[in-house]
Image (cartoon, helix red, strand yellow):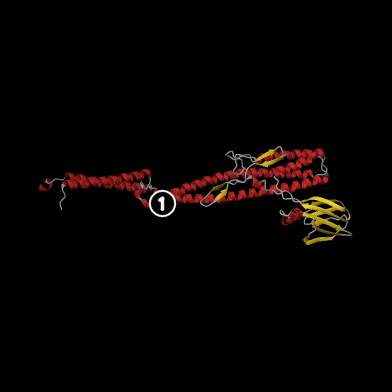
Amino acid sequence: MRLSFNQTYAVNVAAIGKAQERLQMASAKLEKQTKILTPADDPSGAARAAALDQQIDSTGQYQVNSNMLSNSLDVEETVLRSIQSSIQQAKTLVISLGNGANSQTERAAIAGQLANVRAEIFDLMNQRDSNGGYLFSGFNEKTQSYEYNESTGYYDFKGDEGQKFLQVSTSVTVPANDSGKNIFETVDARNKAINVTPAGGITSAVIEVASQSIFDGFYSQKYDGVTPANNDYRVTYTAPDQYAITLQSGAPLVPPVGGTVLPGQAVNFNGLKIDHIGTFPGQIDFSLSAPAKKNILNTLTDVINAVLRDQLAPEQLKEVLVDTSVQVDRAALKVGETVSALGGRQNLISSISGSLEDLKIANVEYRADIYELDLVQGITELTKQETQLQVVQSTFTKVTQLSLFDYIR
């Protein structure tokens, strides 16, 4: 088959064009240092690279979330540790109030110090985060967490119970805040015996909690929120030396409680110490206090008011101080539990952040293997295409210079 001059010319021009395209592509890849200029260059590789880009972006966002969350939890922990310190200071002052050698003037001065500690705690409870939101207001972060109620003389929580969460990995979300409702408003007031009423030959009675832990265990099992009468007890003394404890309704306890006791001798009952003055027969009625919650601000308010009134008998002041001491301890415990929970969250974030960084590095390296061009490989390919173009151009030049007279000579 013969090829005309025009056909030969066209074939060589096409070859030069393709060689130039390959050279331009090699040059562009080297310039951009990529193996894939368009998805058509490597559809499978381009798809894998796109998926990796998405994973890398997601990982980056999770890392941003983790850093933001860690900083936020650091702020909360710092504030709560300051509250812990203030509560401990309050406990020390409450203990000093129990010193019988103090005069009323000295007790009033200590109450003034307690008021200053209360002001510190109030300020800390209303701390804001870096965005200006109140740390302990839950979802309602634009509202001040605690306010003083002038009509009652107490401090009220104004936030809500909301807890925000932030996603730090594909399947893990971590609490980003703690509501003051859960930290400060769930502190149990001290459980005790109330409405102590002597009768018959018993002229006076005092019931105190000798062991708070034992009594709290009894209270948690026996307090009846449905039938109030089941919370009313009676100690009945019979001559010459017997006692029995029943419900005021007359119903016996299960198992029965009773025994031998002498006039003036205390009776111990599930952590309670029951003292009396008088003769037998007689009786003492008492009730279990209703469960209540009290925040640390109001706990301190009660003891400050009690001291400043200067109208309490020594036994009454002692009871107030015991109430306060127990409730201060419980408030400190609740704050401590929250601080521990924050530490657990920080450990989780740290662990996940390390895994995210490892995953990001692996994905970046994998993407580089697919997408990025090795410099030496790129230069080699460019040189190869330049050489091929030169060969094609040289061949074209020789062919176009040929004529029939070259063969007639």
Q: Secondary structure at mark 1?
A: helix
Q: Position of residue 114 (x, y in %)?
A: 74, 40
Judging depth in this view, the residue of 59 and 203 nearest the camera is 203
In the image, residue 116 lies at what x, y percent?
72, 38
Which residue has dot 1 on it?
48
Query: Farthest residue in the bottom direction?
Result: 255
**Above or below — where is 340 with respect to 107?**
below
- Please provide percent x and percent y for residue 408: 10, 47
Look at the image and tell me whether residue 209 can be seen.
no
Residue positioned most to the left? 408
Q: Left or right: 399 with respect to 256? A: left
Residue at x 57% of width, y 43% of height: 71
Q: Residue 375: in sight, yes or no?
A: yes
Q: Decide which of 390, 6 is in the foreground and name it.
A: 6
- Which residue lies at the image location 50% right of the left edge and 46% below the top edge? 61
Residue type for callout 1? Arg
In the drawing, does residue 219 fall left or right of residue 170? right
- Badge 1 crowding class, 10 Å Cα cut-off, few under 14, some 14 to 19, many 20 or more, is some
